[in-house]
Amino acid sequence: QMRLVESGGGLVQPGGSLRLYCVVSGGILSNNAMGWYRQAPGQQRELVANITSGGAPIYADKVKGRFSISWGAAENTVFLQMNSLKPEDTAVYYCKSEGYENEIWKRTLWGQGTQVTVSP
């Protein structure tokens, strides 16, 4: 069964950096778009960054210039490089993937989330 596997969260001081990693496990999605969302306590889940196979990455205004999303060398992998982290970046970060299995069935996958805490 296909699923997303995330890693890279943790505790970091303000101004520090973290790199999140996400991979589709158990299969391959074609025409895949992958992205990162986050949800802070008491807040709605919000888009952080998204990347498609043929388009330019998009970023939430809150993270522009600090975060960078990129494809990994292996298929269906994506990184989120987070620099100049602020306490308000504290949240659970979720990876999302949308694509086609066997080029027929559209699949939308969510990861289980990885905690990012920015604190002195």
Image (cartoon, rainbow, N blue to C red):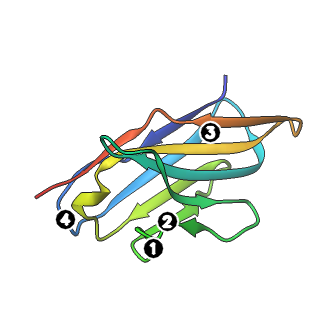
From the viewer's perspective, is residue 30 above or below residue 52?
A: above
Query: Rounded to the nearest whole Å, what is the CA distance between mark 1 and mark 4?
Result: 17 Å
Structural crowding at the residue carrying mark 4, measured as other residues with C-alpha within 10 Å and reported as few (<14), some (14–19) or many (≥20) = some
Q: Left or right of 45: which side holds 85?
A: left
Query: Rounded to the nearest whole Å, what is the CA distance between mark 3 and mark 2?
Result: 23 Å
Circles 1 and 2, Cβ within 8 Å, touching? The answer is yes
Q: Nearer the viewer, mark 4 or mark 3?
A: 4
From the viewer's perspective, is residue 62 above or below residue 31?
A: below
Q: Left or right of 62: which side holds 47?
A: right
Q: Which residue is mark 4?
A: 14
Q: Which residue is mark 3?
A: 24
Element type at mark 4: loop
Query: Rounded to the nearest whole Å, what is the CA distance between mark 1 and mark 3?
Result: 25 Å
Q: Amino acid at mark 3?
A: Val
At 68% across and 49% down in the image, what residue appears? 75
Estimate the x, y position of residue 99 in percent, counting from the top left.
75, 44
Q: Which residue is mark 1?
A: 64
Q: Which residue is mark 2?
A: 60
Quarter of the image containing the C terminus?
A: bottom left
- Mark 3 vs mark 2: which is more N-terminal? 3
- Mark 1 vs mark 3: which is more N-terminal? 3
Query: Rounded to the nearest whole Å, what is the CA distance between mark 2 and mark 4?
Result: 19 Å
At 17% across and 60% down in the image, what residue appears? 13
- Mark 1 vs mark 4: which is more N-terminal? 4
- Mark 2 vs mark 4: which is more N-terminal? 4
